[in-house]
């Protein structure tokens, strides 16, 4: 069977298994990979399936440990206290309040380069605030997802650019300004677009009835220790590499979780880990399935066919191909999209400034975070917000995504001018 | 009533869990058996010109009994002269780099000076393959008396040997890189004696350079055909004269060589740090390898050896590559032949520039003969 046919067969199998047979997404991806392998004559490639499944092992651990961290914040009462503080401090100035909430979501993503980490660590802090100022669950989930994605592409850490840079031997130097040009306006536009329409100004009395309890009087500064320790563990190894060892993100989350356990009111740490595992298992299984699916696409040659087909388009269509293929492939894996498509695209535009090209391409690839089948950011944001419909979250995200495309395109088209200007 | 409820809800779930667990164990066993195959090292049969066989841990004992320890082959002439280091297998998914080192070890004699060869610079990276690349574990080359196997490894150190990766890697030269680069040997120079495994390997190779008093370091690589640095020699600025001479000498083999200066702000790579930290002449050479490119078709041992790919010629016609990629492929024998031509030219040029440190190496296979007779002709039989 030819490579295009194998690809179509894998895709159709996945869609049918998910939508008609109603298998979980992860299981459908595994079975679609198996079907693709059998159709290509590769048999039952156990090594490849296991190897593919481990492709995102580190990401799986980050998601799980970040969820444990959030459960400890909830359990200790720290989360309620943070929300209480934020609401009381900023409720008077609506646009500023929205921008501050957006920045709070973005911050963990800016440090880790991971939108999922941003959504999982800042999401539960911001989610109740968004609801309390009047946003619907779906709109609030979209706000959260967009914040995560913006944090992912914002400086100082944009892993998508790092991956593309590694593929073309471009050092991760001088990227801060292009990324700021991109992310600054996007953050303002997106937070105001999603927030201003529904957010309402609330009176002090209304606020008092909405406020979650603050545990500050009982536990005081102890409640901030888990958050401070996490920030310290994220930033410390970069600022003082000789003194502070890098535990990796999973290690940092676990250590900060232990601080969270001791920070406030008593709760069962074991039960918190079980609840975290239960909540994150669906997304973990999707990631495992995505890894298998991608590995079998490569094994059967259909990945090569896909990449070459896109790259063989006439130059005039190439930018359009970038804008569409990077998010679509990002729907399977954003990092995979940056590596597999992003690197050849940068090379195809080698006459432009590679930093601007990489920044723009990272914006296109990041859109994949809300594109099915994986749609990690949208899915996680929906989960944090308790929003049952992923589709509603994606619908609210359409206009923000359009601004992502426009800003990325502007950066690409004006790269030569910006290059001279900067 | 309670028993019935337990039967109704508990047993089906328990049975399903047990079935899934058994299935997982069977898959883990089958896959595990295959993964273990990658740990079997391919034999290398040095020529009788070999003077010493050492381990990397002899230069840096902290590597002893770790997966980073590896073989170091030393060919010393009777007369004193200059000293060359050749590293292959820095990235074990670039097979021409490894095979060039093996071909040299199995053939050469040194009359003057010294040649130090490390064929599996990152031994750990030979023990696994890159997830989502669908790579075969081995490829085969026919010799006079049977087939020899060689492993196709990964670009990075095995995560079983070094884990976890940081979110952001700041290498010993202070460059910020994506986290997984912490396992890329060619981003970890000049290494750290108390660092992670890959940084220790880099430090140990720097120790080889210092203790063996190396004059010229040659790091042998391959690159994907869509990458601009291809059929190229990357040189430290202290080696610019040498590089220019090499490009001229390569023409005697009918080969064109692209020259690329090592960017001063791209840190942690051999062609930068060997020159900066140890002060030696430092170069890195590249040939085109379809098997580790992003545009490749179905991966297979044949793709590695014959280089025939379904999609690279199409990409070449679309102008998306930095090398002409013909339908007939770019076979491994041609890529190794090109590396041998570069090494011969490097030695000749070095001798021209530094006559007091002359190096004389005999029996380096002629690149044209390698193309004609194949790699197997220059390799020892499997037993």
Image (spheres, rainbow, N blue to C red):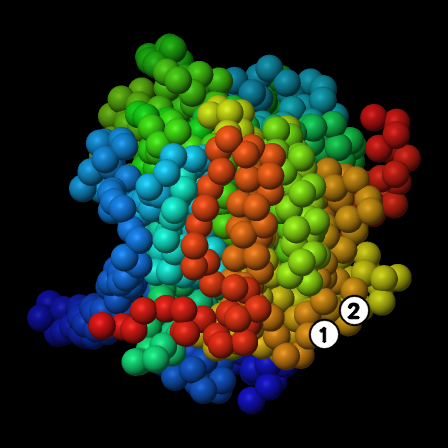
In this picture, is B251 found above or below B141? Answer: above
Tell whether B254 sits left or right of A231.
right
Query: Neighbour class for label 2 at 10 Å: few (<14), some, many (≥20)?
Result: some
Q: Which x, y percent locates residue B367?
A: 55, 64
Q: Which residue is mark 1?
A: B314
Tell whether A273 sits left or right of A313.
left
On residue A295, the disc is none
Q: Which x, y percent locates residue A155?
A: 64, 30
Q: Which x, y percent locates residue B175?
A: 54, 28
| The furthest residue to the left | B3
Tell whether B14 sits left or right of A114.
left
What residue do we see at 55% from left, 39% from top? B351
CA–CA distance in space, label 1 to label 2: 6 Å
Q: Which x, y percent locates residue B1?
A: 11, 71
Q: Which residue is mark 2?
A: B318
Q: Is A307 or B111 nearer to us in this picture?
A: B111
Q: Is B139 or B244 nearer to us in this picture?
A: B244
Total marks placed: 2
Determine if residue A394 is in view. no
What residue do we see at 45% from left, 80% from top? A37
Q: Tag 2, which secondary structure?
A: loop
What residue do we see at 35% from left, 43% from top? B77
Q: Are marks 1 and 2 in contact (CB under 8 Å)?
A: yes
Chain holding disc 2 = B
Q: Tag 1, which secondary structure?
A: helix
């Amino acid at each position: 069977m030819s490579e295009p046919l194998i690809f179509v067969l894998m895709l159709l199998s996945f869609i049918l298994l998910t939508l008609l047979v109603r298998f979980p997404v992860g299981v459908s991806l595994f079975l679609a990979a198996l079907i693709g392998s059998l159709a290509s004559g590769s048999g039952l490639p156990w090594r490849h399936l296991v190897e593919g499944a481990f492709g995102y092992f580190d990401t799986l651990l980050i998601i799980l440990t970040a969820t444990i961290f959030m459960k400890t914040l909830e359990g200790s009462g720290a989360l309620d206290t943070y929300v209480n503080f934020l609401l009381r401090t900023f409720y008077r100035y609506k646009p500023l309040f929205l921008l501050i909430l957006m920045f709070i979501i973005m911050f963990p993503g800016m440090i880790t380069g991971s939108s999922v980490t941003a959504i999982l660590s800042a999401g539960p802090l911001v989610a109740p605030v968004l609801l309390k100022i009047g946003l619907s669950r779906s709109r609030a989930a979209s706000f959260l997802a967009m914040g995560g994605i913006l944090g992912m592409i914002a400086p100082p850490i944009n892993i998508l650019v790092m991956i593309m840079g590694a593929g073309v031997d471009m050092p991760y130097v001088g990227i801060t300004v292009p990324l700021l040009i991109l992310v600054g306006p996007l953050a303002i536009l997106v937070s105001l677009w999603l927030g201003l329409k529904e957010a309402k100004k609330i009176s002090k009395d209304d606020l008092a009835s909405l406020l979650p309890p603050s545990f500050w009087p009982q536990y005081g500064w102890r409640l901030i220790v888990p958050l401070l320790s996490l920030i310290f563990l994220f930033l410390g190894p970069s600022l003082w590499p000789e003194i502070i060892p890098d535990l990796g993100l999973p290690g940092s989350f676990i250590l900060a979780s232990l601080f969270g356990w001791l920070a406030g009111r008593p709760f069962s740490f074991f039960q918190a880990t079980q609840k975290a595992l239960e909540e994150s298992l669906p997304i973990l299984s999707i990631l495992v399935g995505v890894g298998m699916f991608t590995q079998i696409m490569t094994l059967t040659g259909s990945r090569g066919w896909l990449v070459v087909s896109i790259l063989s388009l006439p130059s005039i269509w190439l930018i359009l191909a970038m804008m569409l293929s990077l998010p679509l492939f990002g729907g399977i894996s954003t990092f995979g999209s940056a590596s597999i498509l992003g690197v050849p695209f940068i090379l195809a535009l080698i006459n432009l400034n590679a930093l601007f090209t990489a920044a723009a391409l990272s914006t296109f690839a990041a859109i994949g975070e809300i594109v099915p089948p994986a749609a990690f950011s949208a899915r996680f944001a929906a989960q944090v917000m308790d929003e049952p419909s992923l589709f509603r979250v994606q619908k609210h995200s359409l206009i923000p995504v359009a601004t992502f495309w426009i800003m990325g395109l502007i950066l690409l088209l004006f790269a030569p001018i910006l290059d001279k200007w900067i | 009533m309670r028993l019935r409820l337990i039967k109704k809800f508990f047993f089906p779930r328990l049975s399903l869990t047990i079935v899934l667990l058994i299935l997982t164990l069977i898959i883990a066993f089958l896959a595990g058996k295959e993964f273990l195959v990658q740990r079997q090292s391919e034999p290398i049969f040095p020529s009788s010109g070999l003077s010493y066989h050492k381990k990397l841990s002899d230069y840096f004992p902290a590597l002893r009994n770790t997966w980073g320890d590896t073989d170091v082959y030393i060919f010393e002439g009777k007369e004193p002269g200059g000293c060359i280091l050749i590293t292959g297998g820095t990235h074990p998914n670039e097979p021409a780099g490894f095979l060039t080192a093996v071909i040299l070890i199995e053939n050469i004699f040194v009359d003057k000076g010294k040649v130090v060869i490390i064929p599996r610079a990152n031994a750990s990276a030979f023990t696994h393959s890159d997830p989502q690349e669908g790579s075969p574990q081995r490829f085969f080359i026919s010799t006079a008396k049977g087939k020899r196997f060689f492993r196709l490894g990964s670009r990075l150190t095995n995560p079983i040997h070094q884990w976890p990766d940081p979110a952001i890697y700041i290498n010993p030269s202070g460059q910020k890189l994506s986290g997984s680069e912490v396992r890329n040997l060619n981003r970890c120079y000049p290494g750290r004696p108390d660092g992670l495994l890959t940084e220790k390997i880099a430090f140990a190779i720097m120790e080889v350079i210092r203790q063996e008093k190396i004059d010229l370091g040659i790091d042998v690589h391959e690159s994907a055909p869509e990458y601009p640095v291809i059929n190229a020699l990357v040189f430290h600025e202290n080696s610019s004269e040498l590089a220019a001479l090499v490009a001229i000498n390569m023409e005697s083999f009918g080969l064109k060589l692209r020259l690329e200066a090592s960017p001063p702000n791209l840190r942690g790579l051999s062609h930068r740090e060997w020159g900066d930290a140890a002060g030696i002449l430092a170069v890195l050479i590249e040939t085109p390898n379809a098997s580790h490119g992003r545009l490749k078709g179905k991966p297979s041992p044949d793709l590695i050896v014959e280089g025939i790919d379904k999609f690279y010629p199409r990409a070449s016609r679309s102008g998306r590559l930095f090398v002409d990629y013909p339908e007939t492929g770019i076979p491994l024998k041609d890529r190794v032949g090109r590396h041998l031509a570069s090494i011969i030219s490097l030695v000749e040029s070095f001798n021209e520039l530094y006559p007091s440190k002359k190096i004389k190496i005999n029996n380096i296979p002629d690149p044209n003969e390698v193309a004609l007779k194949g790699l197997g002709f220059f390799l020892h039989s499997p037993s």
